[in-house]
């Protein structure tokens, strides 16, 4: 995957299935992100559209209903959730019909039941595994029960611990809030064990989506480099980073190899716009009217161009192609400018 030598095709050219993250891409909290719904309705009209979410707090049916209320046409089986990936994983580790200690909400409980397992909230019920996912109502008592159940290390006969995901943050309408990663970390701090992760950036959730939709040439849209883009890269799927959620231009410029998107968009309207070529001449990278040059330890902006997104694209390409870390450069603040919408 590379930003270099793209032709004038759009990000959607030759794509048969578009897979979109939800939080930070389609909505933030209950409300839709500007331009997301209209842009995705255009996708619906021309190719298959599915959704992948690490958020374990809601069922696939409730997510589909929410998206439908926002103006999309979505069935429950078009939503692939991290609890579904977790159940695929846990089913390979414990006997069918076992009891699972669930830390999480309705979305996780629903998938545990559909997979044929029993749910408990107490370590005293001798669960065969702990599965942990995000829900706003998760509190200290829930985390404590997980810690009690997991006190024995797995290599000493302890039970498996599966986390639906480890996103550190989650976008909300009022701002950015702690995500499941912070809650998993709290249990880890108490017991010194590491959870096995089922959702992004691990590949099972992407593999489930590709198989479910029969995708030959999928494109994944996300707002986070560490989960969305890294996960798509591991799964061999081309990706879009849209700057409407968590990660900002400064994070993009510092992205490590393996978590760099194929395309960078300011918002989803750009999905069906011709994607500009990245032109390289010596140490200068140009994207349309934006040009950035690497001068030893300095990143120099030669031209900002007419569109802020092109300057971000040029800056990212200029830094990435050097193979050097961003902290080895003096980067002008203007390259970090962030006029893009975020929650």
Image (cartoon, helix red, strand yellow):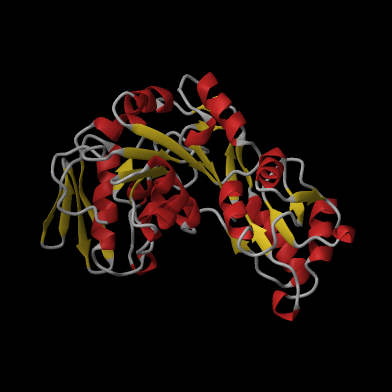
Q: Is residue 224 in view?
A: no
From the top left corner, tell me how far across and down residue 132 is, in percent: 69, 54
Q: State the residue at coordinates (49%, 59%).
A: 202
Q: Residue furthest bottom?
A: 156
Instruction: Work out whether residue 343 or residue 32 is closer to the camera in this orientation and state it.
Output: 32
Q: Residue furthest left?
A: 281
**In the displayed structure, would residue 262 be above or below residue 175?**
below
Q: State the residue at coordinates (48%, 54%).
A: 227
From the top left corner, tell me how far across and down residue 146 is, in percent: 79, 59
Q: State the residue at coordinates (61%, 30%).
A: 62
From the top left corner, tell me how far across and down residue 286 is, in percent: 16, 49
Left or right? Give the position of 118 relative to 20.
right
**In the displayed structure, would residue 233 be above or below residue 175?**
below
Q: State the residue at coordinates (49%, 56%).
A: 204
Instruction: Work out whether residue 89 or residue 171 is closer to the camera in this orientation and state it.
Output: 89
**In the displayed structure, would residue 249 be above or below residue 17?**
below
Left or right? Give the position of 75 relative to 40.
right
């Amino acid at each position: 995957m590379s930003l270099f030598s793209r032709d004038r095709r759009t990000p959607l050219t030759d794509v048969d299935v578009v897979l979109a993250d939800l939080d930070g891409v389609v909505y933030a909290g209950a409300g839709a992100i500007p331009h997301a719904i209209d842009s995705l309705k255009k996708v619906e009209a021309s190719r298959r559209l599915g959704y992948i979410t690490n958020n374990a707090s809601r069922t696939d049916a409730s997510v589909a209903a929410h998206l439908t209320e926002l103006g999309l046409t979505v069935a429950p089986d078009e939503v692939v959730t991290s609890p579904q990936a977790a159940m695929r994983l846990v089913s390979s580790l414990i006997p069918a019909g076992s009891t699972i200690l669930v830390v999480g909400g309705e979305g996780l409980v629903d998938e545990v039941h559909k997979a044929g397992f029993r749910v408990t909230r107490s370590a005293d019920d001798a669960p065969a595994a702990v599965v942990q996912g995000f829900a706003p109502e998760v509190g200290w008592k829930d985390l404590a029960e997980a810690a009690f159940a997991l006190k024995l290390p797995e290599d000493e006969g302890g039970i498996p611990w599966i986390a639906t995901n480890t996103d550190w943050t989650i976008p909300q309408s009022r701002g950015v809030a702690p995500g499941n990663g912070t809650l998993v970390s709290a249990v880890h701090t108490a017991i010194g064990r590491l959870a096995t992760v089922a959702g992004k950036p691990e590949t099972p959730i992407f593999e489930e989506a590709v198989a479910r939709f029969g995708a030959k040439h999928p494109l994944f849209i996300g707002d986070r480099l560490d989960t969305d883009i890294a996960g798509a890269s591991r799964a061999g799927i081309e990706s879009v980073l849209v700057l409407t959620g968590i990660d900002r231009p400064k994070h993009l410029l510092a992205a490590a190899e393996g978590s760099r998107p194929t395309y960078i968009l300011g918002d989803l309207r750009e999905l069906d716009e011709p994607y500009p070529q990245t032109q390289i001449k010596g140490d200068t990278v140009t994207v349309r009217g934006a040009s950035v040059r690497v001068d030893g330890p300095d990143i120099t902006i030669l031209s900002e161009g007419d569109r802020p997104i092109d300057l971000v694209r040029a800056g990212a390409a200029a830094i990435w192609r050097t193979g050097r870390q961003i902290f080895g450069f003096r980067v002008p603040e203007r390259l970090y400018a962030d006029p893009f919408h975020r929650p």
